Image (spheres, rainbow, N blue to C red):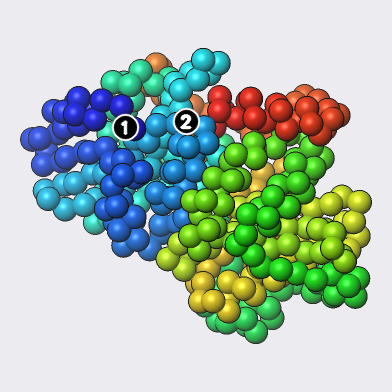
Amino acid sequence: MIPDPIAAAHFLNSHLANAGVEAQLIDPLTDPSWDVQIASHPESSFFHTSAWAKVLCRTYGHHPAYLQIVKEGELVALLPVMEVRSSLTPRRGVSLPFTDLCEPLLFNGGTFDLVCDRLREHGRTRKWKYFEIRGGAPADEVRSSVAFYGHRLDLRGGVEQVFSGFDSSARRAVRKGERSGLTVEVSRTEEAVQQFYRLHARTRRRHGVPPQPLSFFLSIYREIIESGSGFVVLAYRSAQPVAGAIFFEFCGRAIYKFGASDESLQALRGNNFVMSHGIRHLAENGAESLHFGRTSCSNEGLRRFKRSWGAAEGTCNYFKFDLDSGKWETARDNASGFHTALFSRLPLAVNRLAGSILYSHLD
């Protein structure tokens, strides 16, 4: 699916031979070496994997341009990139669409600047308007386009030590769920994904954004959950789903990707109940860490929720380079605005239809 791979590789390398640098485009959908290489890096995450690439390509039709840079015969950098093409939005390269964080994986001799040099060259051949990198640490003169909070929980101490780090507010919420008679199920079934999606669609409407299409979650089931690289946690009151969460895992590093709940039953603290059991399941099964994904700097409630589990707080910086102007651009967090008021008022069926139409044009 990589467009014009021979021509692209020739251009990428034509200016670099004297420096002993070779840049190649890898198709993670067909080349098994990609996952082997990223597994050797301590900062790789599930979002770097071929499974996530398959979900994005097969749901939205994006084209992979996964970059491998070799210097003097040694691997120095890896970066997943999707080329996003749309009749409504400019062609661009994004690392990666619908992904919280996907920093360049740098090995000995690799730098953020080197990766960006290769992306600039490839982007110009592909006529991108811009490229965006979600995560990483560039030189000081490069400012982020937008920043988010990120939270990571160390699970290596085992269940008891991890649970001892929970805030009192989290402990109270979990006890409230227990007293309310909630039960929990950790599952890898398609039915669990379908149940989660119904909660997800309602939650997204409440937040004023359309839900991703059902096909996206069915791809997640087929490519990730069914193979054992992810799972769903659902909390029930009797037989009624109250809250749910979806987790991904790669090389012992887990990611909390999606959460949803029934707003009419929020007093039962289903979100807290689900999260505590997701953490327990990961810790009991040897996971080393859990990343909670990105959090808008304006969303103080979600920030408190993630910190309440004892997670260390950091910053997730995004970097956007405009190829027309040749400058690093600033952007804004679109977590709220006119669109949130609109979508929160639309009927659920209309919201779902909007999501199925719009997301292939977005990133």
Q: In this view, does 277 lie above or below 322?
A: below
Q: Quadrant of the N terminus?
A: top left
Residue 312 spot, x, y in % from top left: 60, 64
Q: Which amino acid does label 2 sit on?
A: Gly
Q: Which amino acid does label 1 sit on?
A: Ile
Residue 134 spot, x, y in % from top left: 48, 42
Residue found at x 38% / y 63%: 42
Residue 113 spot, x, y in % from top left: 31, 39
Q: Does residue 9 appear to the left or right of 101 in the view shown? A: left
For residue 162, what is the image quadrant? Answer: bottom right
Q: Which numbered marker is on residue 108?
A: none
Q: Can residue 187 be seen in this view?
A: yes
- Residue on which disc 2 sits: 61
Residue 205 spot, x, y in % from top left: 79, 37
Q: In which quarter of the image is the C terminus?
A: top right
Q: Looking at the image, which is closer to me, 177 or 341?
A: 177
What secondary structure is marked by label 1?
loop
Q: Which numbered marker is on residue 2?
A: 1
Residue found at x 35% / y 51%: 105
